[in-house]
Image (cartoon, rainbow, N blue to C red):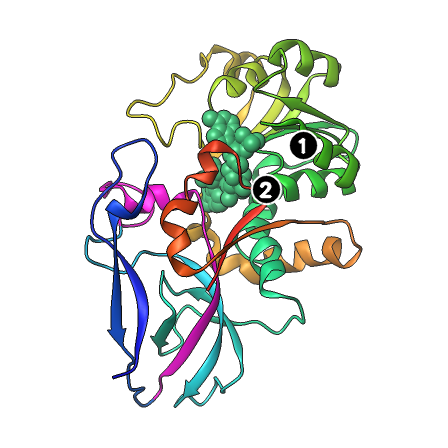
Amino acid sequence: MTTYTAINLVARPTGGPVGPELFEVVQKEMPTIGEGQFLVKQNHMSLDPAMFGWMSPDTESYIPPVELGEVMRSSGVGEIVESNHPDFNIGDRVMGMMGWQEYFLTDGTGLNKVTAPLPDEAILSVFALPGLTATQGLYSIGKPQKGETLVVSGAAGSVGSIVGQLAKADGLTVVGIVGSDEKADWIINELGFDGAVNYKTDDLAAKLAELTPNGIDVYFENTGGPIQHHVFERMNAHGRIAVCGLIADYPKAEPDLAPNWIPIIKKRLTIQGFTMPDHFGEVPALLAKLTPYVMKGQIKHRAHVLQGLESAMTGLNLFFTGQNKGKLIVKL
Ligand SMILES: NC(=O)c1ccc[n+]([C@@H]2O[C@H](COP(=O)([O-])OP(=O)(O)OC[C@H]3O[C@@H](n4cnc5c(N)ncnc54)[C@H](OP(=O)(O)O)[C@@H]3O)[C@@H](O)[C@H]2O)c1
């Protein structure tokens, strides 16, 4: 019997680091493809902070939790190795939600062909969730205008790094908030940000004041935590805050208190959360917006690649220690 490896979620995180105790590595029999189906060999898989939400039992969220005993949810890129589908051929490269497994049997629902002649890592780092999220949040909520000042937290991460580069290309002053000097150096000297705050070592209030003398017009929020309060205090009248993620709160039993709401009235701020599943129907338009910046060489990325499916089980912790340098990807 020929088999392949898959990883099921069997327990829910309770705070703190996650590891193999939450998962079960199983061998599954290779499926026989039916009419209208094809089999994908997954080559690269994306790890995302959102997975902590998907593993939680919260049924009120924007997407149902992964059921215990089910293959862990994830997106990835793979190659079709068998096909009985009229529109998908052996050798085609596809992208979509395939889960933590080496092979994926499908009728094609929710999968898209990858035609761009770019490595899987570049596809997952730029044209998949990170680039789509950055484009959606920045333009639909942030509404950046040339000459304004934008601050982005998680600035060296996969989403934040693209937000900052788009805003720079549009003529804004861009300041990134990061957790290490190496990341500060990368976003300034490689990506062209105007400044960086190391929230672990700098005096946040003083450094933000120094780097944003004209206040802040757009805040792209990826982290929450104390950073949020300091940025909020410097928001200008009619400022916009795109609430993309609150990673500082994900490992906590109780999230931090948010800033007082009175300045929202006084400064007429717009604060809006968003999640990408609401916008998957807009992917062609988002890609049409993002792609010209990429073609002009204005969007650089770096991928942090882990080796082997099983590395995903502990790899997720890198998000909280900040040890991921760029888009976290598992090479199968
Ligand atoms: N709304 C949506 O649809 C959507 C879609 C994709 C992603 N997101 C959210 O966007 C955010 C970024 O995601 P990503 O995939 O690009 O991840 P990422 O930024 O590549 O990785 C997460 C980074 O967050 C930083 N971090 C961790 N704990 C922190 C804390 N307590 N305070 C401040 N920073 C902290 C770390 O960098 P440092 O070394 O700088 O600390 C870490 O490297 C996440 O909150 C994610 O949930 C939302």
Q: Quadrant of residue 182?
A: top right
Residue 323, position as x, y percentages in the image? 53, 37
Q: Is residue 112 above or below residue 238?
A: below
Residue at point 47%, 38% (across, down): 319
* Residue 165 left/right relative to 77: right
Disc 1 residue type (three-letter): Glu
- Whether residue 94 is visible, yes or no, is yes
Give the mark, 1 or 2, whose residue is nearer the N terminus.
1
* Residue 218 disc label: none
Instruction: Identify the residue position indicated by label 1 in the image.
Output: 182
Report if the beta carbon of the residue with label 2 is closer than 8 angstroms to ligand 1: yes
Q: Quadrant of residue 239?
A: top right
Q: Is residue 290 above or below residue 205?
A: below
Q: Residues in magenta?
A: 36-65
Instruction: Identify the residue position indicated by label 2 in the image.
Output: 325
Q: Quadrant of residue 6?
A: bottom left
**Callout 2 environment at 10 Å: few (<14), some (14 to 19), or many (20+)?**
some
Residue at point 54%, 41% (across, down): 324
**Callout 1 environment at 10 Å: few (<14), some (14 to 19), or many (20+)?**
few
Residue 262, position as x, y percentages in the image? 47, 10
Report if the beta carbon of the residue with label 1 is closer than 8 angstroms to ligand 1: no
Q: Is residue 14 magenta?
A: no
Residue 294, position as x, y percentages in the image? 73, 55
Residue at point 78%, 36% (across, down): 189
| Secondary-structure class at tag 1 | helix
Q: Is residue 107 above or below residue 122?
A: below
Question: Are the residues at dot 1 and dot 2 in contact (C-beta closer than 8 Å)?
Answer: yes
